[in-house]
Image (cartoon, rainbow, N blue to C red):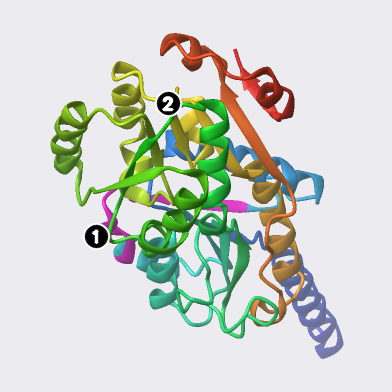
Amino acid sequence: MSKKVICLTLCAMLFALCQSAEAQQAKKVPRIGYLSSTDPATESARVEITRLALRELGYIEGQTIAFEYRYAEGKLDRLPELAAELVRLKVDIIVVAGGTTPIRAAKNATKTIPIVMMGLPADPVEAGLVDSLARPGGNVTGLTNLARELGGKRLELLKEAVPKVARVAVLYDPTVQGSVLDVKEVLPVAARALGLTIQPWEVRDADGLEKVFAALSNERPDGLYVPTSGPLMRANQKRIVAFALKSRLPSMYSYRETVDAGGLMYYGADLADSYRRVAYYVDKILKGAKPADLPVEQPTKFELVINLKTAKQIGLTIPQSLLFRADKVIK
């Protein structure tokens, strides 16, 4: 075989290898890490909304995008290791569902992989997660749901639903910064204006819930409010709802899923809209945008959800004027 033929053969082989490498590179599927403080069942609805929004942008799970899911299932001490797992997998982005704790776990695990907050119920600037809403400055951006600022409005709506309410028990986790600020700063001011008395009850762990329930059964408040709910409250939402139903307590929540599970009322950001917006951040970052330059978004849509089935169970008649204003009524 002549040198010319050998040379041509080698060139053809190199060209084929280059083409193959380019094809493989072109087919690289971006991987999204999904970190949650709760469980797959709790997250399923929001994951599906985000998945559909990504599909509209051309990202199809299993084909043009892949997800790595990690769930702490209410065990917050697992979050750092789960976040570290995602970093070791070299995912392209980490989407974080839940409060400050899982976001901080992800932020502590990596300073380079972009992190997208999926509706943080606290102020990310106060929490030290970003420099400012307009210029996050690091590797964290996403959405905040302004939960704390809505505390007064929620009390107002509870009072409107139950005009005779005078004493409202507030269940809160003292380890959740937003809840503490709500109880100490926001709610007392709103309560005074509405002529209500706030009765705060700390809940530090799942076992502590039963003690609080026993105390509330003796105290007999007129209403129940669960403010900015961290992982502990979300993991025990069914127990809280069951207690409110059994005690015939009108209840207001800061977490939409709780009302779907049988709670009386929810008022806050339109969460479905927030979950859809997560896809916008994922798309922008995959196309080269830096989290530091993508402003943190605040909600533009809010919703009032009333569970009429629950109202009937506890013997409560919701004023028609309030039902007309509700974005959704569960019957």
Query: Does residue 207 lie above or below 35 as drawn?
Result: above
Across and down, in percent, residue 171 comes to: 31, 44
Q: Give the residue type at disc 2.
A: Pro
Pick the residue in front: 50 or 59.
50
Secondary structure under the numbered disc 1 in the rendered image: helix
Across and down, in percent, residue 231 comes to: 35, 49
Which disc, if any, is residue 268? Answer: none
Query: Does residue 319 lie above or below 119 as drawn?
Result: above
| Residue in the picture at 29% in, 29% down | 239
Pick the residue in front: 7 or 131.
131
Mark 2 burial class by Cα count in 10 Å: few <14, some 14-19, many 20+ = many
Query: Does residue 242 lie above or below 141 as drawn?
Result: above
| Residue in the picture at 68% in, 18% down | 320
Is residue 247 shown left or right of residue 229? left
Across and down, in percent, residue 308 comes to: 56, 16
Determine which quarter of the picture holds residue 290: bottom right
Is residue 54 shown left or right of residue 183? right
Q: Give the residue type at disc 1.
A: Asp
Q: Residue furthest bottom?
A: 3
Residue 74 colored magenta? yes
Question: Label 2: which residue?
Answer: 250
Mark 1 burial class by Cα count in 10 Å: few <14, some 14-19, many 20+ = few
Determine which quarter of the picture holds residue 28: bottom right
| Residue in the picture at 56% in, 41% down | 156
Is residue 255 shown left or right of residue 208? right
Q: Can residue 264 be seen in this view?
A: yes
Which disc, if any, is residue 77? Answer: 1
**Span highlighted in magenta in the image:** 66-80
